[in-house]
Image (tube, rainbow, N blue to C red):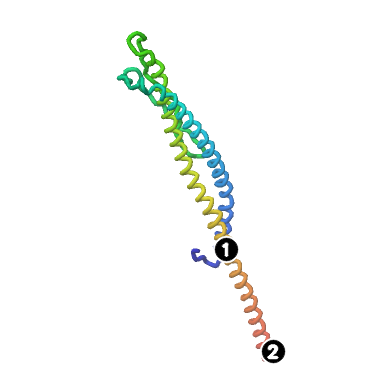
C-alpha cells in the first residue's frame, strides 16, 4: 500500500476515489456478464459449425474416389470476393462475414464427369463453411481477450482499489480523530496552566 498523507484533503481525495471506483464497478461487471454470455453463445455456434463441417467431410468421403480423377477445380470454381464487415459487441470490434462471392463455370454435361456439378456445389459449401469458421474463431478470440481484460479490471476494483481506499479512509479518520483528541487535551492543559498562573498571582 502506498503511503498516504494524514490530512483532510487526502481524506477528501480518498473518498472521491472510493465513490468513483464504486460507480465504475457495476458497469464493468455488466460488461463482464455480457461478454461471458456472448462467448458462451459463440462457443455453441462454433461447435455447431464444426459439427456441420464434420458432416460435410463425411459426405465428401463419398466423393473422394471421384476427386482422384484429374479435375482443374480453379476452372470451375474460384472465390471472387470475401466480404467482411465490422461488428461491435460490448465495445469490442469483431469481424463479421457478410458474404462470399464465387465465380462458377457451368460444367458441360457432355464433356465433364456426371458428378462434377455436385462436386462443385460441395466444394463451394466447404469453402463458405471454412471461412465462417475462421471468422467465428477470430470473433471468439477477440471477445475472450476482452473478457480476460475486463475480468482483471473487475478484480482490481473489487479486491484492490475499493478495499485500499476504504482502509486509507479508516486510517486517516483515526489519525485525524487522535489529532483532535490530542488538541482538546492540550487545550485543557493550557487552560489549566493559565488558571494556575492566575491563581498564583
Extreme residue toward the top, this view: 110
Extreme residue toward the right, this view: 199
Q: Residue at x 33, y 22 (%)?
A: 68
Label 1 to label 2: alpha-carbon separation: 48 Å
Quadrant placement of the C terminus: bottom right
Seen in the picture, residue 105 relative to 1 is either above or below; the reply is above
Extreme residue toward the bottom, this view: 200
Q: Where is mark 2, residue-wise?
A: 199
Q: Which mark is residue 125?
A: none
Q: Residue at x 57, y 47 (%)?
A: 29
Q: Is residue 35 left or right of residue 123?
A: right
Seen in the picture, residue 107 relative to 29 is either above or below; the reply is above
Kindly indicate whether the residue at mark 2 contacts the one at mark 1 (C-beta within 8 angstroms).
no
Seen in the picture, residue 73 relative to 170 is either above or below; the reply is above
The spot of residue 70 in percent (x, y) is 30, 19
State the residue in front, 54 or 80: 54
Q: Where is mark 1, residue-wise?
A: 167
The spot of residue 104 in percent (x, y) is 37, 17
Judging from the image, what secondary structure is the residue with disc 1 in? Answer: helix
Judging from the image, what secondary structure is the residue with disc 2 in? Answer: helix
The spot of residue 121 in percent (x, y) is 41, 19
The spot of residue 27 in percent (x, y) is 57, 46
State the residue in front, 193 or 130: 130
Residue 184, quarter of the rendered image: bottom right
Residue 30, quarter of the rendered image: top right
Q: Is residue 12 left or right of residue 64?
A: right
Q: Residue at x 62, y 72 (%)?
A: 180
Amino acid at each position: 500500500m502506498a503511503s498516504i498523507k494524514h490530512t483532510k484533503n487526502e481524506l477528501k481525495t480518498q473518498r472521491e476515489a472510493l465513490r468513483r471506483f464504486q460507480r465504475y464497478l457495476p458497469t464493468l461487471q455488466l460488461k463482464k456478464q455480457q461478454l461471458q454470455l456472448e462467448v458462451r453463445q459463440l462457443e455453441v455456434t462454433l461447435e455447431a459449425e464444426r459439427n456441420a463441417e464434420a458432416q460435410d467431410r463425411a459426405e465428401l468421403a463419398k466423393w473422394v474416389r471421384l476427386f482422384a480423377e484429374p479435375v482443374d477445380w480453379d476452372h470451375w470454381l474460384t472465390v471472387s470476393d470475401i466480404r467482411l464487415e465490422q461488428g461491435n459487441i460490448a465495445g469490442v470490434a469483431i469481424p463479421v462475414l457478410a458474404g462470399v462471392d464465387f465465380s462458377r463455370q457451368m460444367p458441360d454435361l457432355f464433356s465433364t464427369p456426371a458428378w462434377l456439378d455436385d462436386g462443385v456445389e460441395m466444394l463451394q459449401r466447404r469453402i463458405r463453411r471454412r471461412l465462417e469458421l475462421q471468422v467465428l474463431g477470430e470473433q471468439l478470440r477477440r471477445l475472450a481477450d476482452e473478457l480476460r481484460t475486463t475480468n482483471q479490471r473487475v478484480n482490481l476494483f473489487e479486491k484492490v482499489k475499493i478495499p485500499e481506499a476504504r482502509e486509507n479512509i479508516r486510517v486517516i479518520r483515526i489519525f485525524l480523530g487522535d489529532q483532535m483528541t490530542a488538541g482538546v487535551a492540550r487545550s485543557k492543559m493550557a487552560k489549566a496552566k493559565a488558571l494556575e498562573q492566575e491563581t498564583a498571582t
